[in-house]
Image (tube, helix red, strand yellow):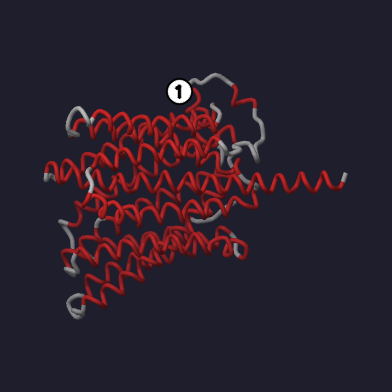
Amino acid sequence: MLISILSSKNFLKNKEFSNVILFSTASFISLFGTSVYNFAISLYVLKLTGSGLNFATTLVISILSTILVNPFAGVLTDKLDKKLLAVITDISNGILLVGLYILTTQCALNLSLIYISTFLLNIFSTIHGINIQAATSNLVSEKKLISINSINKVIESSSSILGPMVGGIIFAFLGIRFFIIINGFSFVISALLQLLMDFKFNYNNDKKNKEQINFFTDIIDGITYLRTQKNIINIFGILIALNFFLGLSIDVPMPYIINNVLKLGTNFFGIIEASFSVGMILGAIIIKKVMNNYSYQKIIKSTSIILSVCMITIGFSAIMHYKVYNKIIYLIYFIIIMILAGIAISSIDIPIFYILQKTIPDSFRGRVLSIGISIAKIILPIALILSGTLLDLIPTYILPIISGIGLCAFSILYIRFD
């Protein structure tokens, strides 16, 4: 009897460990392949047309398709088998890219094909992303939930560093068709690995999931549920505020300050951008230990204030350039800022998604996550447009400083969990 109990426990541990390994491998293959492909396709569009507008159009298509599909992705996630949906969406992306590769043997890859394939890829990827975000808490026990979220953040950040590096090297020697077929196969491999995963390792069966799909009613049900959950609304409020202040203070003003005010050059700018991803990796590595010793509220509030200080210091660099002229000093200055900012964002994101995954019941998780993420994604382009407009009207240092003060005030006054 004792032997059977022990073997049962070992079996569960092995199953959970297997889930973590398969999840990590599938995520890395898929995210790295996509990162390389996205970088290569952007270079190809610029090379093909020489137009920044055409490149911007591909980004707009990506954002719009994500926002439009998110609510429907949440319904599909809640109503369909998560494993089946994960496999179907990855296979669909694989078939789409392999089909695009075959099509380019007969005709040249033009803008129309790029726009259509980008739109469809983002639809399948959005559904897959929401589905995996909702399914993560079903793959492992609650004890391992922080670990798997941290691993995923490390993989995302590593892919964002390595993807452009590898993409740039390969693009110099091989054609765009190579990237298309490689990314197509990466999705297929990811789907096969997900077939081996147990998506119901930590799953509470809910009869609501077996109801028929009615998109309008199901989305309204998700909104109704969300409106009754003050704590979850507060958490989404943090994500929305972060997107707004980051868009307003870092995404547009920082590149402008580095390239136009300080004139550090593209090489230094690339190093500074990579520092941000390094910071996110460091944050993902240390967050589990931090969460064992401090409350989620204290971690999120403290790191939000650290992030606000980073924003303010970006603004101060535009003031300092009148007295400090050494480019190496500015490089070190921005590397430190971006590493700290990356650590702060990881230390905010991971606890937030851990709370959401743990708190929201399985029958509503997909819809609630999709609604919150959609609102946060809508806020970012608004902040970017506002930031770009204001940069032409006011001194460059004002936006980062005002945004940092705004985020600091928000963190002190707003961030609290009931």
Residue 80 horizontal side relative to residue 182, left or right:
right
Residue at 49% across / 39% down in the picture?
369
- The residue pinned by badge 1 equals 216
Measured as percent of width and height from the top left, residue 64 is found at 30, 36
Residue at 39% across / 44% down in the picture?
376
Measured as percent of width and height from the top left, residue 190 is found at 46, 40
Residue 304 horizontal side relative to residue 225, left or right:
left
Picture quarter with the N terminus:
top right
Q: Which of the 4 image quarters holds residue 279?
A: bottom left
Residue 361 horizontal side relative to residue 387, left or right:
right
Residue that sits furthest to the left in the current view:
50
- Residue closest to the eye, 218 or 174: 174
Dot 1 amino acid type:
Phe
On screen, residue 249 above or below 34: below
On screen, residue 199 above or below 330: above
Q: Which of the 4 image quarters holds residue 175?
A: top left
Q: Secondary structure at mark 1?
A: helix
Residue at 61% across / 38% down in the picture?
198
On screen, residue 2 above or below 408: above
Q: Badge 1 local density, few (<14 within 10 Å), some, or many (20+)?
A: few
